[in-house]
Image (tube, rainbow, N blue to C red):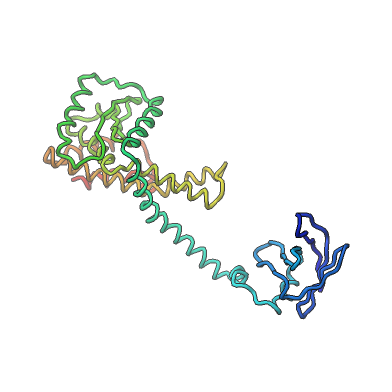
Amino acid sequence: MSVEGVVYSAESSQKETASLVVSSSGHFLLSTKHDVNEYSLKQVEISEQLGNLPMRIRFPDGRVFATEQKRDLQLLLQRNKPVSWIAKLEGNAIAILSCLFLTIVLLFSSYKYGVPLVSDLIVERIPNQAQVYFGEQVLDSLDSQFEPSQLSLEQQTAIRKRIEKTLGELPNLPFNIVIEFRSLDNYANAFAMPGGKVVLLDGLVKLAKTPAQLDSVIYHEIGHVYHQHVMHSIVESSLIAMGVAVLTGEATGALDSLVGGGVFLLNSSRSRDAEREADEFAVDAMKRIYGTSEPMVKMFTLLNQQGDDHLPEWLSTHPDMLERIKAMQ
């Protein structure tokens, strides 16, 4: 049989049209406008037949013949040369589905076990000074969205001193706790920064009915500092984003959005675990210092009443608030 294609020179990327005649016994006759050459099957290298890629045949002199007319040629060559396992795999639907399943299991296992392990190793090796500096830079960038606290200096000092007196009752912390005050449209919230900064918004201080209620939220944020949740979250998100980018190529445009959404969904369950760990830390602190977690239950009940989000629990980065309150009792 005869097929048409192009032949590439061994010395350059130049190509010219050519025809290839293949006998049933496996002999090749390559014809171009310049010459005609004959080869045996043992002298040539035939590329693996994957997808829609052209068939390529390499000859002893370095020239490569490529053709799109590969179906009939492939059937003829199979009589003289066994089909590779890759080519067999490509045409086997069960094998393809099995490989896809194993790939999904591998990726999930890498996320479930590999990412936290690598994250732990990385965070352990980040110097404390670097985390403190990073936390300061993050807070500086967020300050463009915050307003200065409207609480009096006396109020701020009293809260700081009250917490400082109780730090000795807590497990050894990796960082010094520094409490900062900010305001944001009377919004009631608090959050921890890498390196030990805990930011309280004025709305949270005003919402608390007693010092113990306010302290319960502060201890929750100190729990994040103790477990270094924020730094772990940053490292894990970076690892996942880089992994997705490597698997899919450059993440741009629509793919950027998909990658971002995927990273959010993958991290959401781990963020909920972090919230539970911080809750447990705060409950233990409240029982040590105040003898009861009841002020924490009342404070989180107030926060639940203030909430205006109605995201389903599976999409939220926080556990269901009623579930958390029940666990505090």
180 horizontally vs 250: left or right: left
Q: Position of residue 309 (x, y in %)?
A: 37, 38
**Quadrant of the image occupied by residue 157:** top left
Furthest-left residue in view?
291
316 vs 146: above or below: below
The residue that appears at 13% across and 41% down in the rendered structure is 288
**Quadrant of the image occupied by residue 70:** bottom right
220 horizontally vs 84: left or right: left
The residue that appears at 81% across and 73% down in the rendered structure is 38
The answer to whether residue 252 is seen in the rendering is yes
122 horizontally vs 217: left or right: right
The answer to whether residue 67 is seen in the rendering is no
Nearest the eye: 229 or 29: 29
139 horizontally vs 295: left or right: right
Nearest the eye: 250 or 267: 250
Picture quarter with the N terminus: bottom right
Nearest the eye: 291 or 206: 291
Nearest the eye: 186 or 105: 105
Q: Position of residue 17 (x, y in %)?
A: 83, 60
